Amino acid sequence: MDSHLFSKWFFDIFVPSVKSWQEKANLNGALLLFDNCPAHPGTDFLKSGNIQCLFLPPNATSLLQPMDRGVLESLKRRHRKKLNRKLLFEGESASTVSILEFWKSVNIKDCIYMMSEAWESIPQLTKLAKTCAEFFNWRR
């Protein structure tokens, strides 16, 4: 992601979608919150009618976004577990495989499949419960 790609997404996809939704819902105004990713252009550039953009304070994303606080932590833990299992399995099948050789052999496709499996292994109720609980705890 870079600022050019993000700007293209903002103006070509996000703005038309929001405007369409606003017309259907008879609303006038929208707010898009950003974290401090370097790919996000300044809020003075990202303006379109009644759509306003604001940045979250630095280092506040994990405190303010419930998904960062619970579900993603669980997802990362499960993904690491899958990576470790793959390392152990490959180590058993070829005793000469070093850790360095293992890491060189893992490609993006492997990681995407492992991440997908990790996501699917999180029960839906857990995803919903953690997100809701953390959101309401944050609002207090």
Image (spheres, helix red, strand yellow):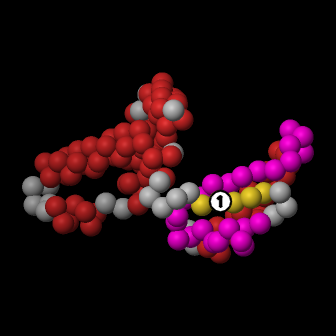
Magenta highlight range: 23-47
Seen in the image, is 11 located left or right of residue 124?
Answer: right
* Residue carrying label 1: 54
- Which residue sits at x=78%, y=57%? 51
Which corner quadrant of the image does residue 3 belong to? bottom right
Q: Please name the residue shown 86% across and 43% down the image.
A: 27
- Depicted 106 relative to depicted 19: above or below: below
Horizontally, residue 136 falls left or right of residue 100, namely right
Name the element at disc 1: strand
**Along the line of sight, which residue is nearer the eye, 97 or 6?**
6
Q: Position of residue 82 (x, y in %)?
A: 29, 44
In depth, the one of 115 and 3 nearer the eye is: 3
Q: Position of residue 124 (x, y in %)?
A: 49, 28
**Where 108 falls versus 44 (above or below)?**
above
- Give percent across and percent down for residue 138: 49, 37
Judge whether residue 30 is colored magenta: yes
Q: In this orientation, does residue 24 appear?
A: no
Depth order, front residue of 4/68: 68
Which residue is at 65% across, 59% downward? 54
* Residue 41 on image: x %, y %: 63, 72
Q: Quadrant of residue 73?
A: top left
Q: Describe residue 100's horizontal placement relative to residue 36 as left or right.
A: left
In this orientation, which residue lies closer to the viewer: 5 or 121? 5
